[in-house]
Image (cartoon, rainbow, N blue to C red):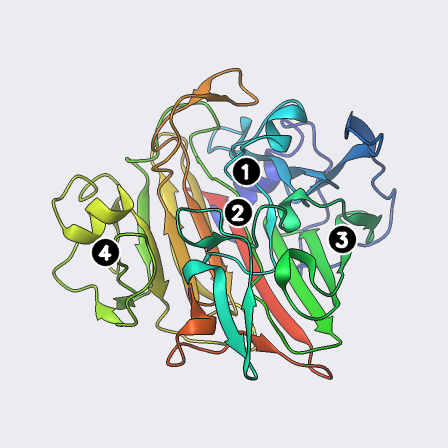
């Protein structure tokens, strides 16, 4: 076990977290008390919104059954002080309004679909347009606005399930989705996705947690150092739809292969930066689609010493630098979120893939099982 890993485990007591026995990572825990929910709020129709809490490996995670939202994610720094490193809200109401997908599960289709239209097996489908002329993150009532069934999976895991009926948000087929949230003994937050359908459909699931390793409400992320194992990215047009090109990151602000601070090139006059008002682009991961999650990213915050590495089975990641946070939302710290106060690393297939035949396919058919895994691993240095 590395020194940094020992530091994370050792700080569990200081964070008020029961540390697990250090050893091989476990996807389901080793028994012990299962997590139980607490009341977080209520929807207009009287449906109760619950908050579940997981703790393991020095990390504490708060999850809502509304949208599968990661409401808090507490991680220790190099001195053993734990703070919440995910952006979110202390009450339910902001999540019900025009929330920018804080911490939510995203579906059926993460990212954008041009004009909200796609053709599948000769039939054209229209899904809600909710981002300028395009559909974003599944439409006006995507998976982020649904109540998920939540059940404990051991002492350090949750299983979330949702059945999306045929025609919901215009998508074909009844889709049965399972998502497992697990805190492993080794300081990892693991997300496993699985889905089946009874008719051909398109699917692109992801999670929209905003990270700030200095702590939520503690300023911007421009001084975070990011490394991405991605030699190409997908340029976009002026409404953020991919042009279809897989462009080299070489010589552009999009080259994070050797690691650099996020703020180093974010003010460049590169046309793609201007389109996104910062970074809001899909990066083509060098590893491609893999059966097991492989590491592609590293994020480091110097003052706290927190280090986050990200692994996935997916072929792409949408790196979003929080460009559209505008100071109108107040987070769990009681502080307003402004531009660049958090970043997202949304592992996924590529945007607008249903309309881009050269991109990896996002079609799911009856008899097939969609599977995807992403792991966020935390340590210090």
Among the 4 quarters of the image, the one containing residue 64: top right
- Residue under label 1: 102
Q: Which mark is residue 68?
A: none
Q: Which mark is residue 208?
A: 2
Q: Residues within 10 Å of mark 3 (few under 14, many from 20)?
A: many
Work out how far the residue at label 3 is from the one at label 2, CA to CA, in angstroms. 16 Å
Q: How many marks?
A: 4
Q: Residue at x 70, y 40 (%)?
A: 19
| 148 relative position to 183: left or right | right
- Residue under label 3: 160
Instruction: For the residues labelled 2 and 1, say whether their Cβ atoms are less than 8 Å apart.
Output: yes
- Residue under label 4: 254
First in residue order: circle 4 vs circle 3: 3
Task: Name the foreground residue: 260 vs 354.
Answer: 354
First in residue order: circle 2 vs circle 1: 1
Where in the figure is residue 318, as x and y percent of width and height?
40, 56
Up-down relation of residue 205 to residue 82 (above or below)? below
Work out how far the residue at label 4 is from the one at label 1, CA to CA, in angstroms. 24 Å
Q: Residues within 10 Å of mark 1 (few under 14, many from 20)?
A: many
First in residue order: circle 4 vs circle 2: 2
Work out how far the residue at label 3 is from the one at label 1, CA to CA, in angstroms. 17 Å
Up-down relation of residue 140 to residue 250 (above or below)? above
| 156 relative position to 379: left or right | right
**Mark 4 secondary-structure assignment:** loop
Task: Name the foreground residue: 102 vs 164.
Answer: 164
Instruction: For the residues labelled 4 and 1, say whether their Cβ atoms are less than 8 Å apart.
Output: no
Work out how far the residue at label 2 is from the one at label 1, CA to CA, in angstroms. 6 Å
Task: List the single residue furthest toward the top.
Answer: 334
**Mark 1 secondary-structure assignment:** loop
């Amino acid at each position: 076990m590395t020194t940094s890993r020992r530091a994370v485990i050792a700080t569990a007591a200081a964070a008020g977290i029961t540390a697990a026995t250090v050893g091989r990572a476990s996807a389901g825990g080793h028994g012990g008390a299962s997590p139980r929910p607490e009341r977080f709020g209520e929807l207009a129709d009287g449906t109760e919104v619950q908050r579940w809490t997981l703790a393991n490996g020095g990390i504490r995670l708060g999850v809502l059954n509304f949208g599968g939202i990661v409401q808090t994610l507490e991680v220790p720094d190099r001195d053993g002080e734990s703070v919440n490193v995910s952006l979110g809200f202390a009450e339910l109401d902001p999540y019900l309004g025009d929330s920018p997908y804080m911490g939510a599960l995203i579906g059926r289709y993460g990212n954008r679909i041009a004009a909200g239209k796609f053709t599948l097996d000769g039939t054209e489908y229209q899904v809600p347009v909710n981002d300028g002329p395009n559909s974003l993150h599944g439409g006006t009532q995507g998976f982020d606005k649904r109540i998920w069934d939540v059940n404990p999976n051991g002492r350090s895991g949750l299983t979330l399930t949702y059945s999306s009926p045929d025609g919901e948000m215009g998508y074909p087929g009844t889709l049965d989705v399972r998502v497992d949230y697990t805190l492993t003994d080794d300081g990892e937050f693991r997300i496993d996705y699985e889905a089946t359908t009874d008719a051909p459909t398109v699917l692109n699931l992801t999670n929209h947690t905003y990270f700030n390793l200095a702590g939520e409400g503690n300023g911007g992320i421009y001084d975070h150092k990011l490394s991405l194992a991605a030699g190409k990215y997908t340029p976009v047009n002026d409404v953020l739809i991919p042009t279809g090109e897989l462009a080299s990151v070489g010589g552009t602000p999009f080259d994070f292969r050797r690691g650099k601070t996020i703020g180093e090139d974010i003010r460049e006059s590169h046309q793609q930066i201007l389109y996104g008002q910062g970074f809001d682009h899909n990066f083509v991961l060098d590893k491609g689609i893999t059966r097991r999650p492989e590491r592609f990213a590293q994020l480091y915050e110097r003052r706290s010493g927190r280090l986050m590495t990200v692994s996935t089975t997916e072929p792409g990641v949408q790196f979003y630098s929080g460009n559209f946070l505008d100071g109108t939302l107040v987070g769990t710290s009681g502080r307003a979120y402004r531009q660049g106060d958090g970043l997202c690393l949304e592992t996924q297939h590529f945007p607008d893939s249903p309309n881009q035949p050269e991109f990896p396919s996002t079609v799911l058919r009856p008899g097939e099982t969609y599977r995807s895994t992403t792991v966020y691993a935390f340590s210090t240095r």
